[in-house]
Amino acid sequence: MRSRRSGGTSATASLRKDRGPADDSVSSLATDPSADPPFRRVLVANRGEIAVRIIRACHELGIEAVAVYSDADATAGHVRAADTAVRLGPAPAAESYLRGDLIIDAARSTGAEAIHPGYGFLAERASFARAVEDAGLVFIGPSADSIAAVGDKLAARRLARAAGVPVVPGTVEPAAVERADGVEAILVDADSIGFPLYVKAAAGGGGRGMRRVTTRADLPAALAAGSAEALAAFGDGAVYLEREVRPARHIEVQVLGDAMGTIVAVGERDCSIQRRNQKLVEESPAPGLTAAERREVHALAVQVAQAAELKSAATAEFLLDEDRHFWFLEVNTRLQVEHGVTELTSGIDLVREQLLVAAGRPLSATTIAAAERAATPGRHAIEVRLTAEDPARSFTPVAGRIGRWAMPAGPGIRVDTAIEAGDRIPPDYDSLIAKILVVDADRPAAIRRLARALGEVEVTGVQTSLPFHRFVAGHPGFASGTLSTDWVAAEWDPAMEADRGRALAVASRFAAAVAATAASSVAPTDAAAGRDRPSSGWQRAGRDDDTDRWPER
């Protein structure tokens, strides 16, 4: 266990009692009984930017935050931000962040009263939520029963259908892929659903176990392959069939519920800019929806949430087809990566609401007011996920050490990250390194602000997805709002963009060389140091453009 105050390790460590500047906020909370901290100490069972995000929310409420870390994250940003940190184990997630028993032990040893799972890892595992509850701790999220009710996609489809919510046509029971008669039965189902269709995993997400099938003859092989991949990824090989809805937009609704049974929708997000079911850009509100359409999809989301008796934050996901019909997909019983765009447009701190609701308090007046005006939003927010990936090579993750790290600033810009210059990006976890969010009065202004913000980003040492995000921000098709889940495949040509990026880099280096030659005729060298005086902006641009844009082949 590591104490933030001492910076060392020991069998026991004292939690920091003195927050310094934050003492005033703690005192103000104490003077208002309704604003007393909901917990004294919370363990954050995650890493990276989401752990830092939760730790900050805890500190603002006067709550002490406990971090957990693997050997790969011993000096990571979330460890630095917390009051106390506890080592879980080696770098592999299966030996550290996925060890629910170790996390519960860490909570007990530090006196934490509650555990916040963030997203990913154990966030949507009903078994973990139940183990937390059985240990006498508070799980900050929906109950284990609610997670079980909708965590399995087939269970969620059955629940939504029973609640009268339109569900994408498909099966609601797992395919019996291990039996010959089961395959025959699923072929009959497929004929009634129609092709093309998808084989999907009942557990998990992110495209694991998913197979697109265009003909009846291809279905048996797709069932076997999808089931095998689902079993390897989630420990559950159950798969089902779902009709392909194309073209379509991916719309998700943020819902919040409390222990008193109040459930509200506080806005929707468009997540259509994605590649292989991995979201790349998200925005709120969804462009082009009418107020009536927003009310419709918000009401559908609340229906599903009520049927599952959801408390805390959750997200109901839908497809919007070309005939403007909404089709239910699934429920995520956790905080979403893209929750920040809803915070920027609604004025709600979703993590704070989670903490208060978990302590048994009702939804805040701010949240109720935000829900009442959600169909007519007055601002627009956009988020891009900056990842350590190479867009020229199918967004292949890369590892390495960050060199220079400069994030944008100014009005209407928010950056969620746990990275600093010199940090190492380990290969063991998700490649997300920062979320860059902007907000403005309307969508055109938000896009202009996004382009400006991305122009200020400087990251060296590892290749990032920055070139792709700059491409999106400057694309007329994105500006027009004509979005679909096929947008990236239709508009993004990585080879062409890589060539263009390298040509720009060559031009920058040429300009840098010209500038350097001109400067050398008037600027003396520092002989004692054995090097030139500090380089100009042109020189730095020429040196760094390849990393910002594309790596050399």
Image: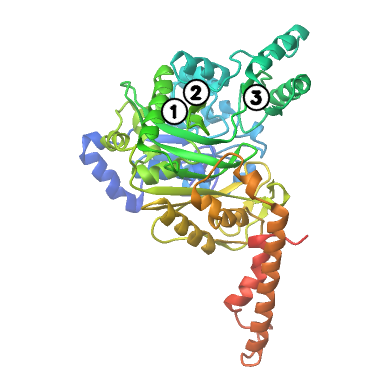
Q: Position of residue 177 (x, y in %)?
A: 73, 14
Quadrant location of residue 285?
top left
Mark 2 vs mark 1, foreground winner is 1
Q: Which residue position is annotated with label 2?
A: 129
76 to the left or right of 33:
right
Give the residue number, with chain letter if any, for mark 3: 200
* Count of picture labels: 3
Identify which residue is drawn at 75% across, 6% down: 181
Q: Residues within 10 Å of mark 1 (few under 14, many from 20)?
A: many
Measure how far apart labels 2 and 1 are at the Cα level: 8 Å
Q: Picture coordinates of residue 225 (x, y %)?
A: 76, 24
Residue 392 shows in this picture: yes
Which circle, 1 or 3, is nearer the viewer? 3
Q: Secondary structure at mark 1?
A: loop
In the rendered structure, which disc, 1 or 3, sits on the residue that comes first in sequence?
1
Question: Contact (CB < 8 A) between labels 2 and 1?
Answer: yes
- Residue of label 1: 141
Image quadrant containing the C terminus: bottom right
Q: Is residue 1 visible?
A: no
Given the image, on which type of amino acid does mark 2 rest? Ala
Q: Is residue 314 above or below residue 521?
A: above
Which residue ends up furthest to the bottom in the rendered image?
522
In what element is the residue under mark 3?
strand
Image quadrant assignment for residue 30: top left
Q: Which of these two is toward me, 26 or 237?
A: 237
Residue 238: percent from left, percent from top: 66, 18
**Crowding near the residue tagged with mark 2, few <14, some 14–19, many ≥20 C-alpha atoms within 10 Å:** many
Q: Quadrant of residue 220?
A: top right
- Residue closer to the observer: 78 or 362: 362
> Are the two marked residues, 2 and 3, in contact with CB atoms closer than 8 angstroms?
no
Looking at the picture, which amino acid does disc 3 mark?
Answer: Lys
Quick one: label 2 or label 1, which is nearer the N terminus? 2
